[in-house]
Image (cartoon, rainbow, N blue to C red):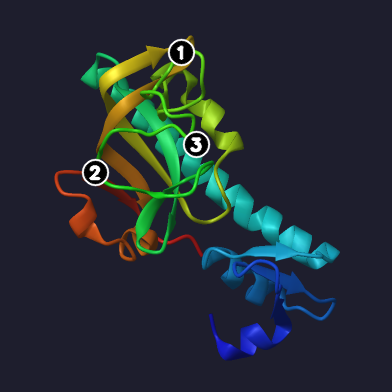
Amino acid sequence: MSVDAWTQLEPCLHHPRVVQAEPWSDSGAIAEALRDGYAVASLTWGAYRCICDVAEVTMTLCSTALAEAAKAAHARGGLTGVRAWDILYGTLRSLVYTGAWRAQMGNAECAIGHRAPDPDCACGYYAVTPEAANSLLDLVGVGRAAIGVVEPRGRVVVGEHGWRAERAIIREVWTERRLYETLDLALYPDVTWHLYEEVA
């Protein structure tokens, strides 16, 4: 993000990745902030319209990626599932919990202390069935989305629309090329990448 753009967007002190949009903020600067992975607070109508435009493009890409991932997961068979991540700090990041994903995720841990996943808890690595892939659209962040195909390992708790697993392996990921180029690919050996060109 350019220095000129930052003069129009004030960082919020309470969160390092949130910027404050002032009434004079340029919509181009806001779009750039969003594409760099920042959230924008205190929106004017122009800022809101800009975020809607970026979100619409993101959702179009994610819908396409989810459809392709669901098809790939179905073709792999078994319990292969679909999930989404943000791409931040060179890694695939969980949309709900803190922490980075690697190509092969080791044993999940539960704060309560039992082996994960437990049928009576919410612990474990999550994925949805190919048929439920579109449900992930409600979770995907603006501008930094990645959609993937994952396989469970170890103990697995299966639900109606997905599963929670003790371990998980990422097989394929769909994302934009500009985001892919920020990743530490040493963390993701043997992952197949499907890249979209940058959205203007």
Q: Residues within 10 Å of mark 1 (few under 14, many from 20)?
A: few
Which amino acid type is shown beneath numbered disc 3?
Ser
Instruction: Give the residue drawn at x 51%, y 44%.
Output: 95
The residue that label 3 is drawn on is: 63
The residue that label 2 is drawn on is: 103
Q: Is residue 7 above or below residue 15?
A: below
Q: Where on the picture, by quarter, is residue 74?
A: top left
Which of the two labelled residues, at mark 3 and mark 2, occupies the earlier sequence position?
Answer: 3
- Residue 35 percent location from the top left of the image: 53, 65
Q: Nearer the viewer, residue 176 or 172?
A: 172
Q: Which mark is residue 119?
A: 1
All told, the count of numbered labels is 3
Which of the two labelled residues, at mark 1 and mark 3, occupies the earlier sequence position?
Answer: 3
Secondary element at tag 1: loop
State how far apart marks 2 and 1 are (Cα): 25 Å
- Residue 162 is left or right of residue 102, and the answer is right
